[in-house]
Image: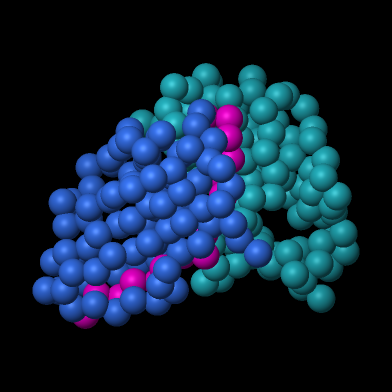
Chain colours: A blue, B cyan
Amino acid sequence: DTEVTQTPKHLVMGMTNKKSLKCEQHMGHRAMYWYKQKAKKPPELMFVYSYEKLSINESVPSRFSPECPNSSLLNLHLHALQPEDSALYLCASSQPGAASPLHFGNGTRLTVT
Amino acid sequence: QKEVEQNSGPLSVPEGAIASLNCTYSDRGSQSFFWYRQYSGKSPELIMSIYSNGDKEDGRFTAQLNKASQYVSLLIRDSQPSDSATYLCAVSFQGAQKLVFGQGTRLTINP
């Protein structure tokens, strides 16, 4: 059982839609991450929040907007996406610091039509 | 550019044999190293973390780290068909709170 929960599991959206991905962790971690993974590729970092503040943005297009309402919750707001944004979106959490391993949620499979 | 290199495979190993997965990294200052297993359509699952030179064993898994050679490996003993998955090497580079993943090695255990 994963202690990082992502909803929804699957999402299909049109290019004009606005939707949000949600992530909740119950591990007491203070760092949370969004990764994007395309088929047969490794996860690619999008954003890092540390102590609820955005610490890393890997030059992600503004149609992706992260939000960290508190230490347990992480959202990714989606607007005007493109078909090439279709991917598995992974949330992860860890303790802050380079030595702490990431624990991933089960992911949201996003399809943009 | 921080890089993590893995042989993408596929690597085929008979059941019961030892599977050996290798990874090299570019930043000599790296301190933390992780192996993740990812089944098709699922999310990565942490198998091992290693921080010091030498071997670290956990059940059938052994991680090996050689910082001088900038090399980290994962050995799986008594391989089982359920070990068939993609194995991702991840390195945390000095001063950065983010993991860089290798391309992953696809491992198939043949019964």
The answer to whether residue A95 shows anywhere in this view is yes
> In terms of depth relative to the viewer, which is nearer, B97 or B7?
B97
**In the rendered image, which quarter contains the C terminus of chain B?**
bottom right
Toward which corner of the image does residue A77 lie, by quadrant? bottom left
- Identify the residue at image location x=16%, y=74%: A17
x and y, in percent, of residue A40 in the image: 46, 64
- The reply to whether the magenta stretch includes residue A112 is yes
> In terms of depth relative to the viewer, which is nearer, A67 or B93?
A67
Left or right: where A23 falls relative to A77: right
> In terms of depth relative to the viewer, which is nearer, A20 or B42?
A20
> In terms of depth relative to the viewer, which is nearer, B98 or A40?
B98
In this rendering, is residue A92 above or below A100? below
- The reply to whether the magenta stretch includes residue B38 is no
Q: Residue furthest front?
A: A70
- Identify the residue at image location x=54%, y=25%: B30
- Identify the residue at image location x=16%, y=64%: A79
**In the rendered image, which quarter contains the N terminus of chain B?**
top left
- Identify the residue at image location x=46%, y=39%: A31
Q: How many marks?
A: 0
In this rendering, is residue B14 above or below A14? above
x and y, in percent, of residue A106 in the image: 52, 65
Toward which corner of the image does residue B86 lie, by quadrant? bottom right
x and y, in percent, of residue B71 in the image: 63, 32
The answer to whether residue B26 shows anywhere in this view is no
Give the residues in magenta: A98-113
x and y, in percent, of residue B82 in the image: 75, 70
Left or right: where A44 falls relative to B4: left
